[in-house]
Image: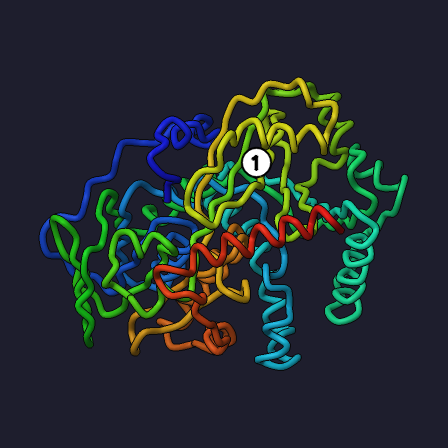
Amino acid sequence: MLLDSDTQLNQRSYYEASVERGPLLPPLLGEQRFDVVVVGAGFAGLSAAIALARRGYSVAVLEADRICSGASGRNGGQAIIGYASDQAPFEQQLGREDARRAWDMSLQAIDLIGQRIADFDIACDWVSGYLYVADSARKARALEADMQAMQQDYGFAVEFAHGAQVQQHIQSPLYCAAAYETKSGHLHPLKYGLGLARAARSLGVQIFESSPVRHIRRGERMTLETDQGSVNAAFGVLAGNCMLGEYAPDAAPELAPRIMPVGTYIIATAPLSEELCQRLIPRNAAVCDNNFVLDYFRLSADRRLLFGGRVSYSTRTPAQLKEVMATRMGQVFPALRQTPVEFVWGGFVDITMNRAPDFGRLGSNLYYLQGFSGHGVALTGLAGELLAEAVAGQAERFDVFARLQHHQFPGGHLLRTPSLVLGMAYHRLMDALR
């Protein structure tokens, strides 16, 4: 999903500038029939299509815009273990055994990226390594407590650093603690997404671009209608996240109140010297702090710093975005204060109230995958696999997630955005004071 009417900003994605897309795929025309129809050609939809096609199903993918034109092709490129919610919702709602299963599946989600890259020869600049950082003594204690709990409860160990030791991981005056692990990593998301699309098509999946779904007629076999055609299928998969509300407001109205589109933004510098890159982030890890309103950043394959953050709950692009983000980047890395910023872009992440993913069914044959809450680079691949298992009649792993209870955002259609804007202002103030 694009930001708003700021066309210049929308066209300045570093990712789009660094790939060559093929010709626009034809839209859906006329009446067609498939075993499964998938709405959304992002990571989740394409992963589901690949897994379904490998099981012998005929699959159509309907994309309102272009392949990975939404969050899948615009995100920070960080593939992270675990969930944005941490383990609490799983432990509290499902119990320790299924919480452990969910945790193990999040590790498998990272492995699946490597498997897809190897199976389909996807060149997407994958780098292993992730660094969690804290910028105050209180946040350092919280970070260490979180990491100790993950080691004690789930056997996941990290390399922890305090004080001057932090400089071995990141050369920044801002951080007083860091935790490094090698399971997570980072990649070029649009290269990865376009590689998934090529893989899906090689397996016989038909992808239709410029084909927004306008209406769904549910039933034993469902029909999805677009502007110029329709698909009749035994199973449907809604994998468009917050795009569903824009393109098909009546497709699944019961799902929309459970997710909120949150704007997040990224700047990309001019290319840096190899020596400077090695000095700033010696292990070339992806980095994220543990603030509520967080910063996340990494180096690209052509040695640019991609620096993300500055969320917006109002769906409007923040004022003076480039300058504000460049200033924040300079606080993290004083050595980059005079470095030119060549790209500024953003997009929407779909979040749930508790930040846990929201997977499930509507009736017996319409599935949905939403609410990745910033962890979608890895979890979307897992979601596609679980979805295909469920369609094939093996729903045990899918139902670990389907059993999670999700609440609607407060305030209804008119008031939930203003209430979240006020809540974000409060959390931003708390981050600054602690």
Residue 39: give x, y in percent of width and height. Answer: 30, 56
Say which residue label 1 marks: 125
Nearer to the camera, 65 or 408: 408
Q: Secondary structure at mark 1?
A: loop
Residue 150: give x, y in percent of width and height. Answer: 74, 65
Answer whether residue 361 is visible to the viewer in this image. yes
Nearer to the camera, 398 or 271: 271
Nearer to the camera, 257 or 56: 257
Left or right side of 283 for 411: left
**Residue at (17% x, 53% y) in the render:** 226
The quadrant of the rendering that contains the N terminus is: top left
Residue 191 vertical position relative to residue 348 in the rendered view, above or below:
above
Residue 205: give x, y in percent of width and height. Answer: 29, 52
Q: Image quarter for residue 363?
A: bottom left
Nearer to the camera, 191 or 424: 424
Q: Residue furthest left?
A: 30
Residue 95 vertical position relative to residue 166 in the rendered view, above or below:
below
**Residue at (64% x, 36% y) in the render:** 298
The type of residue carrying mark 1 is: Asp
Residue 416 vertical position relative to residue 266 in the rendered view, above or below:
below
Q: Image quarter for residue 19?
A: top left
Residue 170: give x, y in percent of width and height. Answer: 78, 36
**Label 1 crowd bin: few (<14), some (14–19), many (20+), radius 10 Å:** some
Q: Residue furthest right?
A: 164
